[in-house]
Image (cartoon, rainbow, N blue to C red):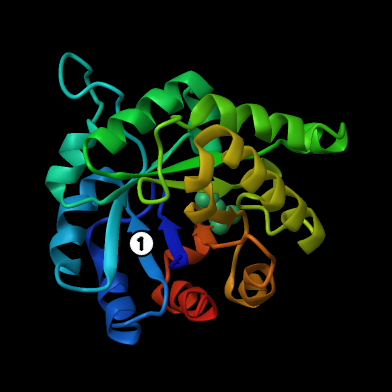
Amino acid sequence: MKKLAAGNWKMNGNTAALAEVQALLAAHPAPACDMLLCPPATLVAQMAAQAAGSALAVGGQDCHPKTSGAHTGDISAAMLADAGASYVILGHSERRADHGETDALVRAKAEAAIAAGLIAIVCLGETEGQRDAGDTLAVIGAQLDGSVPETATAVTLVIAYEPVWAIGTGRTPTLAQIAEVHAFLRVRLLARIGAEARGVRLLYGGSVKPSNATEIFAVPDVDGALVGGASLKAADFGAIVAALA
Ligand code: PGA
């Protein structure tokens, strides 16, 4: 299994930010892991053109479950693929919170993404209140069962475990807490999609930065990272890519 360093630019970056991509490619032309950036939709086509023939894959941050139609403001998975994307992040906690996305909707989006030839990165994670109440594994298990299509494979699916309270806060779970959740995810995924689960990359996300990447990547069943803030600068993201070697 090749590990994956995935960057999520969120609603950050205009065309000037593509200079960071140039710097990243110059510093890491042949990384040991798979390398992915998911810029805002407005930059997908330009970044994909910039990354053509390189080790960098480009992804979207969301897609609509339908292939086309009267859905003002939305983008289909096929449109992302046409723009040069090969991955799409789905069910990020910010979309679940800001747009009320349910597990069923995330699953429908993942099915649409896979049908369009994209790799679906399905995000899961507990809130701080849920962790404090001792509900972390129950919450994550229910999200996985509800959000992951049963037909997903090691090739078409990536899971990102992102505790909501660790996103953008500088706080991270203990390594033991990450290990507990990732081991749980592997077993739950085996029950959901069968033996393919062994090859699915399980990413950790939430305040990953160069200074904590190495210890997080040493945790069993952590197969990469989904990185927000630290993916905006080539030097930081490059250091995380290098830590995944
Ligand atoms: P962060 O975001 O690295 O800025 O905490 C991670 C994410 O939301 O994917």
Residue on which disc 1 sits: 36
Q: Residues within 10 Å of mark 1 (few under 14, many from 20)?
A: many
Q: Nearer the viewer, residue 81 or 94?
A: 81
Q: Residue furthest front?
A: 195
Query: x, y (%) of residue 43?
Result: 22, 52
Q: Is residue 236 left or right of residue 108?
A: right
Q: Residue furthest right?
A: 133
Q: Is residue 209 left or right of residue 114?
A: right
| Residue at screen point 51% across, 65% down | 230
**SS assignment at label 1:** strand
Q: Nearer the viewer, residue 90 or 223?
A: 223
Q: Is residue 215 above or below residue 79?
A: below
Q: Is residue 189 left or right of residue 3?
A: right
| Residue at screen point 75% across, 37% down | 137
Query: x, y (%) of residue 178?
Result: 73, 55
Q: Nearer the viewer, residue 177 or 185?
A: 185
Query: x, y (%) of residue 231?
Result: 45, 64
The quadrant holding residue 129 is: top right
Q: Amino acid at mark 1?
A: Leu
Query: x, y (%) of residue 30?
Result: 31, 82
